[in-house]
């Protein structure tokens, strides 16, 4: 199964709100990426699928070189974030990682969010509930984004 991600290169937030005629230079691509783990898949077999997803994410990151990786929770974002973080560690900084925790996460972070938060992979970590920000002080409370 594939999910679609949108990579936008060299675009400011203001550009996204301009009219269609003004954004002809917008560079965006939709790419298919592999899931690390299917719903209900055993953890033993997910090791292989995670390695495949990481290899595919590496190829995509080298090909596209996005300035921002914006993700919101599904486990499909972990391989992309790990590769972007790896490039940052070795001194190749192509991407900033922004993570927005789901509005449905009221009491605790999702597994993806917890990994990105605890391992300090995300450059910016956003939550939509004020008590989550108190529980995770490095997170930024942004209110409801819907």
Image (spheres, grey):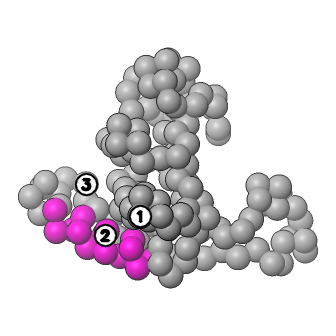
Disc 3 and disc 1: Cα gap in Å?
A: 33 Å
Name the residue beneath numbered marker 1.
90
SS majority, magenta: helix
Q: Is residue 52 magenta?
A: yes
Q: Nearer the viewer, mark 3 or mark 1?
A: 1
- Rendered image quadrant of residue 16: bottom right
Task: Give residue 10's position: percent from left, percent from top.
Answer: 72, 68
Q: Residue at x 41, y 64 (%)?
A: 90
Q: Identify the secondary structure beneath mark 1.
A: loop
Asked whether, in this view, residue 107 is left or right of residue 53, the answer is: right
**Is 108 included in the stretch rendered in magenta?**
no
Q: Which sits earlier in the primary sequence, circle 3 or circle 2?
A: 3
Q: To which residue does mark 3 refer?
A: 39
**In this view, the mark in front (3 or 2):** 2
The local secondary structure at tag 3 comes to loop
Q: Earlier in the sequence, mark 1 or mark 2?
A: 2
Of the pair 133 and 36, the residue shown nearer to us: 133
Q: Which residue is mark 2?
A: 53
User: Upstream in the sequence, badge 3 or badge 1?
Assistant: 3
Q: For residue 7, which quarter of the picture?
A: bottom right
Question: Which circle, 1 or 2, is nearer the viewer?
Answer: 1
At 53% from the left and 63% from the top, the residue drawn is 93
The stretch in magenta equals 47-60
- Picture coordinates of residue 87 (x, y %)? 44, 65
For the residue labelled by badge 2, is the local secondary structure a helix, a strand or a loop?
Answer: helix
The residue closer to the viewer here, 108 or 67, is: 67
Q: Is residue 19 left or right of residue 137?
A: right
């Amino acid at each position: 199964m594939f999910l679609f991600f949108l990579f936008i290169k060299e675009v400011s937030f203001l550009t996204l709100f301009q009219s269609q005629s003004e954004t002809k230079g917008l560079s965006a691509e939709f790419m298919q990426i592999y899931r690390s783990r299917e719903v209900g898949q055993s953890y033993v077999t997910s090791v292989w699928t995670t390695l495949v997803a990481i290899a595919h994410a590496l190829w995509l990151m080298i090909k596209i070189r996005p300035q921002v990786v914006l993700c919101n929770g599904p486990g499909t974002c972990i391989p992309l974030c790990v590769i972007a973080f790896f490039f940052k560690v070795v001194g190749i900084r192509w991407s900033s990682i922004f993570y927005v925790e789901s509005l449905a996460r009221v009491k605790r972070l999702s597994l993806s969010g917890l990994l990105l938060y605890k391992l300090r992979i995300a450059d910016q970590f956003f939550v939509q509930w004020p008590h989550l920000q108190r529980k995770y002080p490095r997170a930024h409370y942004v209110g409801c984004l819907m």
